[in-house]
């Protein structure tokens, strides 16, 4: 499956009763990272700043449809051990997409 930013990931086949919540067996991939759009580097200094991002653990830079992003793998503070959202009813709008 590809999300709106072009990131590919696999979703597991969920088998269960129809009354199970749709997120009951979700692997919560989107709750383990966030990506921020960055300016396309146009100078040595800008490339050096991107290099600095990449010197940090669990940080990646990717390009999607011409836009540059820095992706940081860092789980949400409200992600529960069972991969469910601890603030589901009041979660931010971006989590509802």
Image: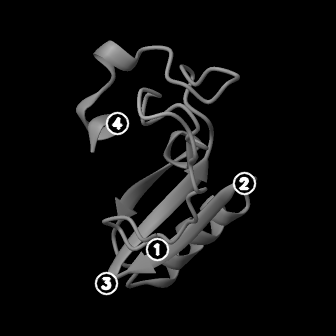
Of badges 2 and 4, the one in the foreground is: 4
Question: Label 1 vs label 2: CA separation?
Answer: 17 Å
Residue 50, quarter of the rendered image: bottom right
Q: Which residue is mark 1?
A: 46
In x, y percent, where is residue 2? Answer: 42, 71
Question: Label 1 vs label 4: CA separation?
Answer: 31 Å
Q: Which residue is mark 2?
A: 56
Q: Secondary structure at mark 1?
A: helix
In the picture, measured across the screen, residue 36 lies left or right of residue 97, that is right
Residue 11, quarter of the rendered image: bottom right
In x, y percent, where is residue 46? Answer: 46, 74
* Image position of 82 with respect to 71: above or below: above
Question: At x 39% / y 74%, what residue is drawn?
Answer: 6
* Image position of 80 with respect to 37: above or below: above
Tell which of 48 and 70 is nearer to you: 70
Q: Which residue is mark 3?
A: 65
In x, y percent, where is residue 60? Answer: 61, 65
Question: Label 2 vs label 4: CA separation?
Answer: 25 Å
> Looking at the image, is mark 2 or mark 3 earlier in the sequence?
2
Question: Label 4 vs label 3: CA separation?
Answer: 22 Å
In x, y percent, where is residue 39? Answer: 33, 70
> Looking at the image, is mark 1 or mark 2 earlier in the sequence?
1
Of badges 1 and 4, the one in the foreground is: 4
Tell which of 10 and 77 is nearer to you: 10
Q: Which residue is mark 4?
A: 95
């Amino acid at each position: 499956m590809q999300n709106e930013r072009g990131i590919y990931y696999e979703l597991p086949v969920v088998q269960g009763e129809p009354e199970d919540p749709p997120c009951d067996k979700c692997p919560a991939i989107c709750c383990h990272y966030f990506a921020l759009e960055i300016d396309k580097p146009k100078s040595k200094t800008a490339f050096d700043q991107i290099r600095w991002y990449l010197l940090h653990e669990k940080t990646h830079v990717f390009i999607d449809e011409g836009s540059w992003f820095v992706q940081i793998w860092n789980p949400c503070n409200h992600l529960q051990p069972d991969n469910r959202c601890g603030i589901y009813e009041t979660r931010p709008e971006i989590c509802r997409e």
